[in-house]
């Protein structure tokens, strides 16, 4: 029997299929039951004796991994892995996996929720009515507007089809495009600069990397329309937060919808006090269906690897096998 830590708080106390998969394989499940993301020190504590972990966004850094030479699998309940130090994991002979193809629908729906909240002034309206006011007026349509997608992978494609359903014009920046998909859905591919200039709603679906770090900054924000809205459901580090705050204050852009932040939890930031900002707590990829799908995929990865199998489509550090 191997000890498996179930780290993500959304998985606390739910009896769904991933639990059965792990228990049927004879593993012991351990839950922190904190109700929020584990800190570095808490993660080090809870990983004691664990051979595998179903991982959320908690920090699997060099210190955490070095403290647990017994750890064989970090199975991300998600499709990104920037919270994991791959170099340290590989050196520790720890396999890191993701759950591809499990949450693009959830992220796209959430990004649309943020777009609608901004266009229809839901935050402003809600606060005003709470204060006893009733400020009727006009808001913005989505139909006829240009939806710009930075990234046209699984989530970008899910956004594209939803944008078309809302009668939007869809344009995209994607270095490795699926040309058949673009042709089928009449999606125009643009350069990065043209995407910034043409988008009425710019939705970010970029993986976080050295190249994408702070790709949204003073210069790129300055290329956007003053009437444009920025939506980020990818990773917080793609936006330089201080530059976004300044752009919003100076009305260089019309507003922003953010589900992710450079540091999480982010503390109190200046943008939080602005009425043209809609905020959520890194939950875009975790609706009930995607949560269950991601957890099941991660559970199968743990069982497979501990049984000597190799789910190549999920493994992000294949050098471990060598």
Image (cartoon, rainbow, N blue to C red):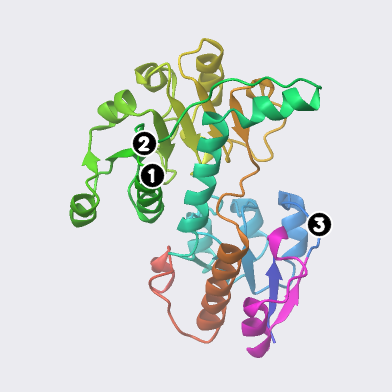
Task: Give whichever of discs 1 and 3 has the lower sequence position.
Answer: 3
Q: Which residue is mark 2?
A: 147
Quadrant including the N terminus: bottom right
In the drawing, what numbered circle is on residue 163? 1
* Residues marked 2 and 3 touching at CB (< 8 Å): no
CA separation in Å, label 2 and label 3:
39 Å
Q: How many numbered marks appear?
A: 3
Task: Give whichever of discs 1 and 2 has the lower sequence position.
Answer: 2
Of tags 2 and 3, which is closer to the observer?
Answer: 2
Is residue 225 a member of the stretch shown in magenta? no
CA separation in Å, label 1 and label 2:
7 Å
Question: Which residue does the image show at 35% across and 36% down from the upper left?
Answer: 148
Magenta-drawn segment:
8-31
In the drawing, what numbered circle is on residue 32? none
Q: Which residue is mark 3?
A: 34
* Residues marked 1 and 2 touching at CB (< 8 Å): yes
For the residue carrying disc 2, how many other residues have a C-alpha within 10 Å: few (<14), some (14-19), or many (20+)? many
For the residue carrying disc 1, how many other residues have a C-alpha within 10 Å: few (<14), some (14-19), or many (20+)? many
For the residue carrying disc 3, how many other residues have a C-alpha within 10 Å: few (<14), some (14-19), or many (20+)? few
Is residue 26 a member of the stretch shown in magenta? yes
Query: What is the quadrant of residue 201 in the picture?
Result: top left
The reply to whether residue 24 is visible in this rendering is yes
Residue 37 in the image, given as x and y percentages of width and height: 72, 51
Question: Which residue does the image show at 37% across and 21% down from the upper left?
Answer: 224
**Which one is in front, 261 or 128?**
128
Q: Secondary structure at mark 2?
A: strand
Query: What is the quadrant of residue 285 in the picture?
Result: bottom right
Quadrant including the C terminus: bottom left
**Which one is in front, 318 or 126?**
126
Answer left or right for 318 relative to 123. left
Q: Secondary structure at mark 1?
A: helix
The reply to whether residue 7 is visible in this rendering is no
């Amino acid at each position: 029997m191997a000890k498996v830590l179930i780290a993500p708080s959304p998985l606390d106390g739910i009896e769904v299929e991933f639990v059965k998969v792990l228990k049927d394989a004879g593993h012991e499940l351990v839950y922190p039951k904190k109700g929020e993301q584990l800190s570095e020190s808490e993660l080090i504590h809870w990983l004691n004796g664990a051979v595998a972990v179903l991982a959320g966004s908690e920090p699997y850094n060099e210190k955490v991994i070095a403290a647990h030479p017994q750890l064989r699998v970090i199975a991300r309940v998600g499709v990104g892995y920037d919270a994991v130090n791959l170099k340290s994991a590989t050196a520790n002979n720890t396999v890191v996996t993701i759950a591809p193809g499990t949450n693009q629908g959830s992220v796209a729906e959430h990004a649309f929720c943020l777009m609608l909240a901004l266009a229809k002034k839901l935050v402003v309206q809600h606060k005003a009515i709470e204060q006893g006011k009733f400020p009727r007026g006009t808001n913005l349509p989505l139909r006829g507007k240009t939806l710009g997608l930075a990234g046209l992978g699984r989530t970008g494609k899910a956004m594209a089809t939803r944008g078309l359903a809302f009668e939007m014009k869809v344009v995209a920046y994607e270095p490795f495009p699926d040309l058949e998909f673009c042709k089928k859905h009449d999606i125009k591919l643009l350069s990065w600069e043209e995407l910034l200039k043409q988008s009425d709603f710019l939705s970010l679906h970029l993986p976080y990397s050295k190249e994408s770090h702070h790709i949204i900054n003073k210069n790129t924000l300055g290329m956007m329309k003053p009437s444009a809205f920025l939506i980020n459901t990818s990773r917080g580090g793609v936006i330089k937060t201080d530059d976004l705050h300044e752009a919003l204050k100076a009305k260089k852009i019309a507003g922003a919808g953010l589900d992710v932040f450079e540091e999480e939890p982010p503390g109190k930031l200046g943008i939080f006090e602005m009425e043209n900002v809609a905020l959520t707590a890194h939950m875009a990829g975790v609706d009930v269906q995607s949560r269950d799908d991601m957890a099941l995929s991660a559970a199968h990865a743990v069982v497979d690897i501990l049984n000597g199998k190799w789910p190549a489509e999920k493994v992000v550090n294949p050098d471990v096998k060598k």
